[in-house]
Amino acid sequence: MKNISREFIAGSIGIITIVVFIWLFSFLKGNNLFNSNNRYYAIYNDIGGLAESSPVQISGYKAGIVRDIDYINDGTGRLLVSIGINKNYELPLGTVAEIKPETVLAGMKISLKMGQSDKYHRDGDTLVSFLDKGLINNLSNDLSPLIARADRVISDIDTLLDGMKPLLNSEFSSDLKESASNLNNTSKNLDNLLEKSGKEIEDLITNIEVFTAVLNNNSSNMDSTIKNVSKISKELAGNDLGSSVKNLNDALDGTKDILNKINDAEGSAGLLLNDDSLYNNLTRSLEQLNILLEDMKTNPGRYVNFSLFRRKKNE
């Protein structure tokens, strides 16, 4: 190993780099140098846009690629297409290499339609070629309505723009500028209002923060108050509150009966409150008693002496 020169190592690295570069370039083109392929040929009058590295498919599966496309210089304008197919896929005699679109936008491909023979093509054989122009025409026919619709849409847009041109006059431009100016003034007024109200807004936010802080600081007190209210509610619910209310209702009903009896002149109290004659008699009796008391105060001897005289006579 010590006898290997630096020049040899550098040359080896260069050769390896070139080989890897060639392999990557071929791989990107669809050629794999490490896989052996059979090469077949097909001659076309028109390839319909087929390109090198286009896929070659068997029953929809990619079995190879288009290797080369060469112009046959015999005055006929024909093209020679070289096809690389993996050796694992044998092609029966009579296999047709048909060019058809892969998708609407992806380009063209070669689809191999297998022959019915029990014999197979050899490497380097020329296959029967065919260009499916009918499918291309069908795609063109399918796209024609879309193209026509797109044309109509573009025409409608042009008509709309033509109709909008009268609006884009100097008066409209002036109104538009005036509207923009008014909007700008409104924006400035709003900015001034916000600037003047900035202190008030700050005070409001400060008050809200203070209120929130007070709530946070007194949260324990609020919790205890809520607990006390809950406790009182439980105590009221635990007591015989319904019985107390019933007793109160019964007492009110009794009072109501008494008042009804008084109003109906039942009993002494009812008669006293409702009979005018009893009131008048009582009033006259009180007046006569008052006269009697006044007379006794004025002439006390009339009553006392008579009583004493009667007592001495009896003795």
Image: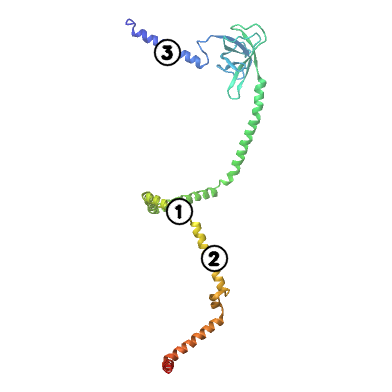
Q: Amino acid at mark 1?
A: Ser
Identify residue type, mark 3: Thr
State which quarter of the image contains the C terminus.
Answer: bottom left
Picture coordinates of residue 165, whole percent (x, y) = 58, 44
Q: Earlier in the sequence, mark 2 or mark 3?
A: 3
Q: How many residues crowd around disc 1 within 10 Å: few (fewer than 14), some, or many (20 or more)?
A: few
Residue 77 position in % (x across, y down):
62, 14
* Residue for point 53% across, 66% down: 254
Q: In this image, 89 relative to 197: left or right?
A: right
Q: Nearer the viewer, residue 131 or 177?
A: 131
Three-letter code for the amino acid on which mark 2 is drawn:
Asp
Circle number at residue 253: 2
Q: Residue at x 63, y 10 (%)?
A: 127
The quarter of the picture where the N terminus appears is top left
Q: Pointer 3: what residue?
A: 17
Q: Is residue 295 above or below residue 193?
A: below
Residue of label 1: 233
Tell me the SS state at disc 2: helix
- In the rendered structure, find residue 33 and report the number of the disc placed on it: none
Frontmost of labels 1 and 2 is 2
Report the Cα–Cα distance between label 3 and label 1: 92 Å
